[in-house]
């Protein structure tokens, strides 16, 4: 916790933290002085009234007003100075986290829920911002102010100060005890409201299920139950608040009567002036304020520190390296090979191999299919090719570049990748295609869309290429999304193409259009295909059957079908049988 706190303060160093510190302590000094000054003014004014000199009174009031106005102005400027720095610091922090997240390795994202990172970017930053611009500041300000004011109070009159403090503290304790039941109820209501939100979001997200299964009554009675509890608790809260308010007023009265009552007696005895009573009464405010807010401030700082800790946790994650320097560089003659795997071992977890001693090669311009049961590591091979994970052992070469000696960004330039559900970003169709090549002209984009069988459906939209996709935009079918992704890959124009079940999620008609687009995209490129439906890869140059972490069978469709008890033959027959059964029934 303490470390986090100092690290939080260190953020100030990046921007000129000196301005923050100037604003911070400047405000504290001026603010404390203003409190004391205000009390002195009140004392003077009332003492002057008692003497009965009207001219003196006017001069005193005007002068004091001027000085207080000036102090307030200086105070606000210092506060501005401080908060301005915080805005800069938080802006920097937000940028740093974004860059950090962009550069984290894929592994990091696989093990976490994305909501978690998003909450770090939003909520946690917000509480840290609040801590820097408010909480830490007020904690220091209010404590210094309270101490200074107390000292000054004793300086004005010892016994009156003692009475003011004692009655003040009693009032605060009174208040704290009374506030507890209220807090308990409020918390309960808050939790129940959370439950209500949960049911509501279930209702919205699951409306089709609710309709189909006729769950109206269930949901409604669940909702009504909790709602009734909220209703009862809220009534209880209103009642408690009313009682507490009246008791609170009593507490405050006690407090006032203490100072004013005893003070008047002192005045009567000629020990203090009326002005002194008023001054002490005024000085009590910052002290009470401090005690009243102390527990909240401390709780807020704890929340902020926890938030800061989560942010720093992300900042401390190690980034994806520029290249996998730790791998052993091995020279392999690769005159006409686009892809080489040699004796590759890989597992996501230590000692749990997904790929074991895997070796294969793909010649330039050839089409090779990877086949195997689900979970055998086909997609993993793609991830290794794209450098998302380093292999534990062995050599990987992509278009003549060794993964061990080339920057990952260079390797990735060589590869176009179309997964099962390609992601489209928020923005227009045009922008989404352009991500394949950021400086592409409009003509290039349209040409790519034509190759990808996407041009026709895009132009059929009212806004054509400027139609928005993603959450805020048009509802595209799976096949249309795939074709936009293919256009993106066309534009990238990489020598190696990786297709990971790119048509598996599509219906027959869009599958045809997407398949045609993929065939065009694959022309003249080295292509590795992972296909769910074996009928789509009959014509590839070679089929590799992955089983148990390495290549178990290899050959053309005909060659593999000729192997009795072969894995490929079995898989193929299974699919064929399913197809035939479907047709018969
Ligand atoms: P395929 O594409 O052949 O169906 P994958 O390459 O996706 O198989 O997965 C191979 C194995 O690795 C599976 O057992 C899977 O559960 C596991 N696996 C895949 N991704 C991860 C990951 N990020 N972390 C841990 N295990 C994983
Ligand atoms: Mg897969």
Image (cartoon, rainbow, N blue to C red):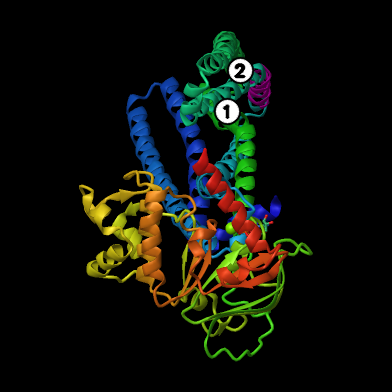
Instruction: Determine crowd level at label 2: few under 14, some 14-19, many 20+ residues with C-alpha closer than 10 A.
Output: many
Residue 172 point in image, percent of width and height:
64, 23
Q: Is residue 26 left or right of residue 232?
A: left
Q: Quadrant of residue 373?
A: bottom right
| Residue nearest the viewer, comparing 270 with 197 | 197
Q: Which residue is drawn at 40% across and 78% down?
A: 524
Q: Is residue 170 magenta?
A: yes
Q: Residue at x 30, y 49 (%)?
A: 468
Q: Tell me the tag on residue 284.
A: 1
Q: Would residue 185 be counted in the magenta stretch?
A: no
- Location of residue 328 (image quadrant): bottom right
> For this view, does 70 lie left or right of residue 408?
left
Q: Give the prevailing secondary structure in the magenta stretch.
A: helix
Q: Position of residue 311 (x, y in %)?
A: 59, 53
| Outermost residue to the left | 462
Residue indicated by mark 2 = 255
Residue density around tag 1, few if under 14, some if 14–19, many if 20 or more, within 10 Å:
many
Q: Is residue 358 above or below residue 282?
A: below
Please state the horizontal and vertical placement of residue 544, each as a whole percent of the image.
61, 70
Tell me: is circle 1 under 8 Å from ligand 1: no
- Residue 319 in view in this figure: no
Element at label 1: helix
Q: Magenta span covers which residues?
A: 162-178
């Amino acid at each position: 916790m303490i470390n986090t706190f100092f690290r939080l303060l260190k953020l100030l160093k990046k921007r000129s933290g000196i301005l923050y510190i100037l604003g911070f302590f400047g405000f504290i000094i001026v603010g404390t002085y203003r409190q004391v000054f205000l009390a002195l003014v009140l004392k003077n004014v009332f003492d002057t009234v008692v003497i009965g000199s009207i001219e003196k009174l006017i001069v005193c009031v005007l002068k004091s007003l001027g000085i207080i106005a000036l102090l307030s102005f200086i105070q606000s400027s210092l506060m501005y100075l401080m908060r301005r720095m915080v805005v800069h610091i938080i802006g920097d922090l937000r940028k740093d986290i974004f860059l950090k997240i962009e550069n984290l390795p894929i592994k990091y994202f696989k093990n976490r829920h994305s909501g978690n990172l998003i909450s770090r970017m939003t909520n946690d930053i917000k509480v840290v911002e609040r801590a820097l611009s408010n909480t830490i500041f007020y904690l220091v300000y209010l404590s210094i102010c309270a101490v200074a004011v107390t000292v000054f109070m004793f300086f004005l009159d010892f016994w009156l100060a003692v009475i003011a403090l004692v009655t003040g503290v009693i009032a605060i304790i009174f208040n704290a005890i009374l506030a507890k039941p209220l807090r308990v109820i409020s918390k309960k209501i808050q939790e129940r409201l959370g439950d209500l939100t949960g049911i509501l979001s279930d209702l919205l997200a699951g409306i089709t299920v609710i309709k189909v299964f006729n769950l109206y009554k269930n949901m409604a009675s669940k909702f009504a139950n909790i709602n009734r509890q909220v209703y009862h608790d809220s009534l209880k809260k209103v009642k408690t608040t009313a009682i507490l308010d009246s008791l609170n007023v009593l507490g405050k009265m006690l407090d006032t009567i203490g100072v004013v009552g005893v003070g008047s007696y002192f005045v009567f005895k000629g020990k203090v002036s009326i002005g002194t009573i008023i001054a002490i009464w005024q000085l009590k405010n910052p002290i009470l304020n401090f005690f009243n807010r102390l527990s909240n401030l401390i709780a807020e700082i704890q929340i902020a520190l926890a938030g800061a800790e989560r942010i720093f946790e992300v900042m401390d994650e190690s980034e994806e390296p520029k290249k996998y320097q730790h791998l052993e560089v091995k020279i392999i003659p690769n005159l006409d090979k686009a892809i080489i795997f040699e004796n590759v071992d890989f597992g996501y977890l230590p000692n749990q191999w997904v790929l074991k001693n895997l070796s294969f090669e793909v010649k330039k311009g050839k089409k090779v299919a990877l086949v195997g049961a689900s979970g055998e590591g086909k997609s993993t091979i793609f991830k290794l090719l794209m450098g998302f994970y380093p292999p534990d052992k062995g050599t990987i070469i992509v278009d003549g570049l060794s993964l061990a000696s080339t920057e990952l960004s260079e390797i990735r330039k060589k590869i176009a990748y179309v997964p099962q559900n390609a992601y489209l970003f928020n923005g227009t169709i045009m922008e989404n295609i352009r991500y394949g090549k950021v400086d592409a002209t409009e003509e290039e984009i349209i040409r790519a869309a034509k190759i990808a069988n996407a041009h026709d459906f895009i132009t059929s939209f009212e806004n054509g290429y400027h139609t928005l996709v993603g959450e805020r935009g048009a509802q595209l079918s799976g096949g249309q999304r795939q074709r936009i992704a293919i256009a993106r890959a066309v534009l990238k124009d990489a020598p190696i193409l990786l297709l990971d079940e790119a048509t598996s999620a599509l219906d027959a008609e869009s599958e045809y259009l997407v398949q045609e687009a993929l065939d065009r995209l694959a022309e003249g490129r080295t292509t590795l295909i992972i296909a769910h439906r074996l009928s789509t890869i009959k014509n590839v140059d070679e089929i590799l059957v992955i089983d148990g972490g390495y290549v178990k069978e290899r050959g053309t469709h005909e060659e593999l079908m000729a192997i009795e008890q072969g894995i490929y033959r079995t898989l193929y027959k299974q699919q064929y049988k399913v197809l035939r059964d479907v047709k018969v029934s």
